[in-house]
């Protein structure tokens, strides 16, 4: 039975050390929390008898020092309950009835979390664990588990066993939740689990992503915040800024505010940049819509959050692709044309551009070198040409460009003109000469005919006269 009781109490960090007239117990408590100290005895029946006869002699005391927390003696067992425990409440508590004396050593831990447990992603929290007791302070071994119940190894500093300072790694939005600090010591036997909450406000996007678009298409960039998911009950603000690729220009597009109730209010800040803030969008999402994206609208779009003078951000890099041909217009038979494909900004090291003709031959494929953001190809075949941006063997974006074949009559005109103006002049000259000769002849013939008519007329006259 003794073994049973002692192991029962040990589970609750309350270990029976001796069971003679004087009992020594150990109990742990958390600052700000609550503890209940008992007056246990071996035989419950006997205890009841004693309680009924020695009720008024049951005393709890903690030497001459006052209890800082709210103390109350309650119930038939005459338990001492202390709420809002303080580090200074650590010490030896005595419960005495008749010849029996129970001494409980109360060991108090206090865990403080920087920023009151409210963090922006990428911040580094600091945890401070303090302990206090009447006996010499034990050397604690501390184990931390994150919200996914994985063990984390913080950087740990120990000041005279009184204070343990732990610096965690940069927080991610997925670190939000309940963490556990497990405190262990062999002597005295302590096994205390301290649960604490971390709220990590941030993005459900990765820190940095890349988005590809073809020029003149509609682009929507989205940032998914987690404030509703983590029940963040505080105001915070933010802004969306655009950082142009080559120039160091930054432009604030809009700012926003999220109230403690989770309502989002946005205010447009720039009027000379063509963009929209979509009305209807998924909950807790920041969005910007570029209705007809320009080549020079590429660059970094950064969504920044601000909370109590601290900042975090997530950026989307917009890469725009454009295609042009020289000469513009349809391709005539036998002629060549240069197609140019260009992307804004820089490509990651494992990316390149490729021109190819749809249903074409291997000869119709041309790849750029890595890092090259512009690829030209000289073509002589009409059809559908595609420029692909390939990253890690994945086609990230393709621009399909239809090269039309010039109609046949245009070919003749072009051939005609290309053969040279000389022939035309010659032909025209010939036509001129031919027509002038014809005209001369016609005039001669006309003159002769007129002479003949006159002659005939004269003859007739003569005949009449005859
Ligand atoms: C704990 O006690 C100290 C000193 O008695 C006092 O200054 C402090 O306010 C107390 N803390 C709490 C949480 O009651
Ligand atoms: C530790 O407890 C003692 C009493 O047992 C108290 O005098 C002392 O102030 C406490 N230390 C801290 C840091 O609260
Ligand atoms: C984030 O942590 C808070 C505090 O522990 C909790 O109330 C909330 O449910 C958590 N949310 C998620 C998505 O883990
Ligand atoms: C982008 O380029 C177009 C023409 O190519 C120009 O009209 C526009 O002003 C430029 N926009 C910016 C923001 O530079
Ligand atoms: C067209 O290009 C091909 C190969 O690039 C070349 O052999 C040919 O001479 C070019 N023709 C013209 C008219 O430029
Ligand atoms: C390519 O070939 C496929 C199958 O032969 C055909 O369906 C498709 O229309 C062709 N595309 C072009 C652009 O020629
Ligand atoms: C394409 O043709 C033009 C003019 O004929 C020439 O200057 C250029 O170097 C050629 N480009 C390629 C990639 O062959």
Image (tube, helix red, strand yellow):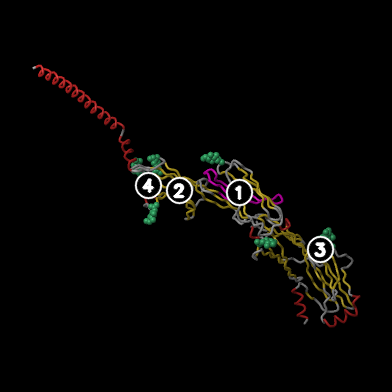
Horizontal relation, residue 239 to residue 373: left or right: right
Query: In this view of the protein, which residue sits in the foreground, 312 or 380?
Result: 380
On the image, numbered disc 1 is attached to which residue? 277
Report ligand 5 position as a quadrant: top left
Q: Is residue 128 magenta?
A: no
Q: Give left or right: position of 211 versus 147.
A: left
Give the class, few, some or many, for how many residues have Cα within 10 Å of label 4's Cα (few <14, many ≥20): some
Residue linked to disc 3: 86
- Tell me the magenta residue range: 289-317
Q: Residues within 10 Å of mark 3 (few under 14, many from 20)?
A: many
On residue 382, the disc is 4
Marks 1 and 4, the one that precedes in the sequence: 1
Give the residue pinned by disc 2: 369
* Label pair 1/4, CB-CB below 8 angstroms: no
Residue most extreme to the top: 465
Cα–Cα span, label 3 and label 4:
84 Å
Q: Is 197 located above or below residue 209 in the figure?
A: below
Secondary structure mostly taken by the magenta-highlighted segment of the chain: strand
First in sequence, mark 2 or 4: give its number: 2
- Circle 3: element type: loop
Q: CA distance from mark 2 to mark 1?
A: 38 Å
Disc 1 is placed on an element classified as loop
């Amino acid at each position: 039975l003794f073994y049973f009781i002692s192991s029962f109490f040990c589970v609750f960090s309350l270990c029976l050390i001796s069971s003679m007239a004087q009992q020594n117990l150990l109990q742990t408590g958390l600052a700000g929390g609550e503890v209940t100290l008992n007056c246990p005895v071996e035989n419950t029946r006997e205890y009841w008898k004693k309680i009924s006869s020695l009720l008024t002699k049951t005393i709890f005391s903690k030497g001459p020092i006052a209890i800082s927390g709210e103390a109350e003696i309650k119930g038939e067992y005459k338990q001492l309950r202390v709420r809002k425990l303080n580090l200074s409440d650590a010490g030896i508590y005595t419960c005495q009835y008749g010849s029996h004396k129970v001494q409980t050593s109360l060991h108090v831990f206090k865990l403080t979390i920087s920023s009151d447990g409210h963090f922006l992603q990428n911040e580094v929290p600091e945890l401070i664990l303090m302990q206090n007791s009447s006996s010499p302070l034990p050397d604690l071994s501390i184990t931390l588990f994150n919200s996914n119940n994985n063990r984390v190894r913080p950087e740990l500093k120990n000041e005279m066993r009184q204070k343990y300072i732990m610096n965690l790694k940069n927080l991610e939005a997925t670190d939000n939740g309940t963490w556990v600090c497990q405190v262990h010591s062999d002597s005295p036997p302590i096994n205390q689990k301290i649960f604490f909450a971390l709220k990590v406000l941030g993005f459900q996007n990765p820190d940095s992503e890349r988005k590809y678009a073809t020029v003149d298409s509609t682009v929507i960039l989205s940032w998914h915040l987690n404030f509703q998911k983590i029940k963040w009950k505080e105001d915070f603000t933010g802004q969306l800024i655009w950082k142009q690729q080559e120039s160091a220009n930054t432009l604030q597009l809009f700012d926003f505010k999220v109230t403690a109730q989770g309502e989002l209010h946005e205010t447009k800040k720039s009027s000379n940049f063509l963009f929209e803030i979509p009305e209807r969008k998924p909950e807790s999402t920041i969005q910007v819509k570029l209705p007809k994206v320009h080549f020079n609208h590429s660059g970094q779009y950064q969504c920044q959050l601000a909370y109590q003078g601290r900042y975090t951000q997530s950026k989307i890099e917009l890469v725009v692709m454009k295609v042009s041909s020289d000469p513009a217009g349809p391709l005539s038979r036998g002629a060549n044309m240069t197609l140019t494909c260009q992307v804004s900004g820089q490509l990651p090291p494992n990316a390149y551009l490729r021109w190819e003709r749809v249903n074409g031959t291997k000869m119709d494929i041309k790849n750029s070198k890595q890092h090259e953001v512009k690829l030209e190809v000289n073509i002589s075949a009409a059809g559908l040409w595609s420029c692909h941006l390939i990253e890690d063997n994945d086609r990230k974006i393709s621009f399909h460009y239809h090269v039309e074949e010039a109609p046949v009559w245009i070919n003749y005109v072009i051939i005609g003109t290309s053969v040279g103006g000389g022939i035309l002049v010659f032909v025209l000259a010939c036509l001129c000469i031919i027509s002038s000769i014809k005209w001369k002849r016609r005039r001669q013939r006309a003159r002769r005919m007129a002479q003949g008519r006159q002659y005939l007329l004269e003859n007739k006259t003569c005949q009449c006269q005859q």
